[in-house]
Amino acid sequence: MERIFGRPIVTQEEMRARIRELGKQITTDYTGKDFVLVGVLKGAYAFYADLARAIRIPMRVDFLMVTSDGSRAKTSGKVKMVTELTEDIKDKDVLLVEDIVDSGLTAQYLVKTLAKKKPRSIKVCTLLSKPDRRTNNVTIDYVGFKIPNKYVVGYGLDYQQKYRNLPYLAVLDIEGDQE
Ligand code: 5GP
């Protein structure tokens, strides 16, 4: 059995305050635009719900779901879109909402893929960024928190599909015994 312990790295209060700031900034930047907020599932679901409610302009909401092969504790190098957008984003201003940008592969792939649908603009907002791990050149326009190279769970982020419902963000420590 493995035992998992989480040490908080971002508290609920810090999260709330930062998301309020991001919401204000995005409201200013997208006022008067034909705005679509696109959430990247599953990881971004909690952040998306809070961010959307901190943005005070009319917008469309949409989602896509991605998976990557292999263990979710590492970026495996292959991203797959498993559900498509339902909104037509042609000529619209799209903001992609991600949970975390690590190597940058997922964000780069999604920006490239969605750009084919000819939006007027496409930008990326991520709750978390691990700048030390970046290997793919992608512009991240809004970052909630820069974090060190540690595996984090909670607030939408998983370890083997669990811990997404943790209301704060924690560093995962795994202690394995061989039972
Ligand atoms: P990237 O494509 O930027 O390398 O990785 C992005 C994806 O890797 C995220 O959407 C997430 O699923 C996963 N990931 C990277 N770092 C972490 C982490 O610290 N915790 C969790 N739960 N997932 C992570």
Image (cartoon, rainbow, N blue to C red):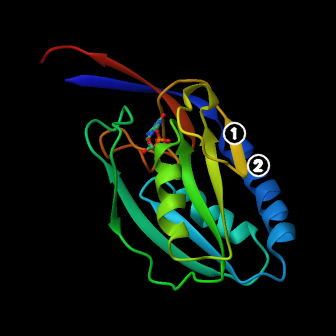
The residues bearing labels 2 and 1 have C-alpha atoms spaced at a distance of: 8 Å
Residue 85 lies in quadrant: bottom left
Total tally of numbered discs in the picture: 2
Q: Residue at x 59, y 60 (%)?
A: 97
Q: Residues within 10 Å of mark 1 (few under 14, many from 20)?
A: some
- Kindly report which numbered mark, 2 or 1, lies closer to the viewer in this rendering: 1
**Up-down: is 112 above or below 92?**
above
Location of the N terminus (image quadrant): top left
Q: Is residue 64 visible?
A: yes
Location of the C terminus (image quadrant): top left
Disc 1 marks a residue whose amino acid type is Phe
> Quick check: 96 left or right of 106?
right
Q: Residue at x 63, y 48 (%)?
A: 127
> Quick check: 160 left or right of 107?
left
Q: Is the shortest distance between ligand 1 and the CB of mark 1 under 8 Å? A: no
> Quick check: 54 left or right of 110?
right
Q: Residue at x 66, y 55 (%)?
A: 125
**Up-down: is 34 above or below 162?**
below
Q: Which mark is residue 163?
A: none
Which comes sooner in the sequence, label 2 or label 1? Answer: 2
Q: Secondary structure at mark 2?
A: helix
Q: Nearer the viewer, residue 89 or 86?
A: 89
Q: Secondary structure at mark 1?
A: strand
Q: Which mark is residue 145?
A: 1
Please provide percent x and percent y for residue 58.
Answer: 73, 84
Disc 2 marks a residue whose amino acid type is Arg
Please provide percent x and percent y for residue 111.
Answer: 54, 59
Q: Are the residues flagged by discs 2 and 1 in contact, CB closer than 8 Å?
A: yes
Q: Nearer the viewer, residue 9 or 64?
A: 64
Q: Which residue is mark 2?
A: 18
Q: Residues within 10 Å of mark 2 (few under 14, many from 20)?
A: some
> Quick check: 102 left or right of 162?
right
